Amino acid sequence: MIAGSIRRRRETVGDADLLVIAKSAPPVMEFVARMPEVVRTVAVGDTKISVKLATGIQLDVRVVPRASFGAALHYFTGSKSHNVVMRQIAIRKQLKLNEYGLFRGETAIAGATEEEVFAALDLPYIPPELREDQGEIDAARAGTLPKLIEPGALRGDLQTQTTWTDGADTLEDMVAEAQRLGLQYMAITDHTRDLAMTGGSDEAKIRLKGRPSTASTRSSAASAC
């Protein structure tokens, strides 16, 4: 499971965090170290391995037991400031929160899922994208957490390119895919000649591309009849 700033959908990330549920950590770490994308092993611990990928990014893989997965996912998703506030809430309830679970004394009372960790602290579930210590705790208590935009909520796309410039698909294919996705509108934003490196269109190219073919002209005429 992806964690860290990637899971929080940050604009930029420093590294990649990955959590794996397993009964034994060594086989997982051996597998990670031998992945073809890995160019160097940075560090290895009992339940963690850090490697550098060919892309230049560092990948941190942590192995956790199923009973602690939710607590670990919350902890390693962050942000750090959000985690500090959550630990303070736990302390006020005479509990202890860490990557292993939520504890009352030595007894774990939550940890398998993030949802049960939040519930045990009397909080609604807070989506990862909002965990930045920017008022999300108070908003959760007040029931005023903002509603995130999910893929199914998208109604259109205002920035697309076609094969007229540097896009991968034709205008017809783009329109067909937009219809398949249930979009209500889309804007074709192919580049102009000022961006020559992308095959930007000038006036002559636009006139040529916009000229209907003989087949389409006949089809239109037939439809008009």
Image (cartoon, grey):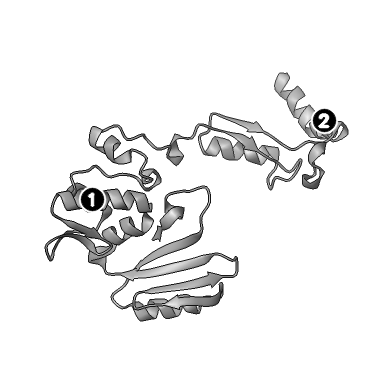
The quarter of the rendered structure image containing the N terminus is bottom left
- Please determine whether, in this image, residue 198 is positioned above or below residue 42: above
Query: Which tag, 1 or 2, sits closer to the chain's start?
Result: 1
Please rate how many residues cluster around mark 1, counting C-alpha atoms within 10 Å: few if below 14, some from 14 to 19, many from 20. some
The quarter of the rendered structure image containing the C terminus is top right
Quadrant position of residue 134: top left
Q: Which mark is residue 211?
A: 2
- Please determine whether, in this image, residue 4 is positioned above or below residue 119: below
Give, as a three-letter code, the residue at label 1. Answer: Gln
At a point 42% along the width and 74% down the height, the residue shown is 49
Q: Is the Cβ of the residue at disc 1 closer than 8 Å to that at disc 2? A: no
Residue 173: % across, % down: 65, 41
Quadrant position of residue 210: top right
Residue 162: % across, % down: 70, 41
For disc 1, the marked residue is: 88
Q: Going by the picture, which residue comes out furthest to the top?
A: 225
At a point 31% along the width and 55% down the height, the residue shown is 74
Residue 177: % across, % down: 58, 40
Q: Going by the picture, which residue comes out furthest to the right?
A: 204
Q: Secondary structure at mark 1?
A: helix
- Please determine whether, in this image, residue 122 is positioned above or below residue 206: below
Q: Decide if residue 172 is on the left or right side of residue 194.
A: left
Q: Tag count in the figure?
A: 2
Quadrant position of residue 214: top right
Q: Decide if residue 179 is on the left or right side of residue 131.
A: right
- Please determine whether, in this image, residue 32 is positioned above or below residue 90: below
How far separated are the C-alphas under marks 1 and 2? 67 Å
Q: Secondary structure at mark 2?
A: loop
Q: Decide if residue 194 is on the left or right side of residue 67.
A: right
Please name whichever residue, 222 or 198, is drawn nearer the observer in this view of the structure.
198
Q: Which mark is residue 220?
A: none
Please name whichever residue, 20 or 186, is drawn nearer the observer in this view of the structure.
20
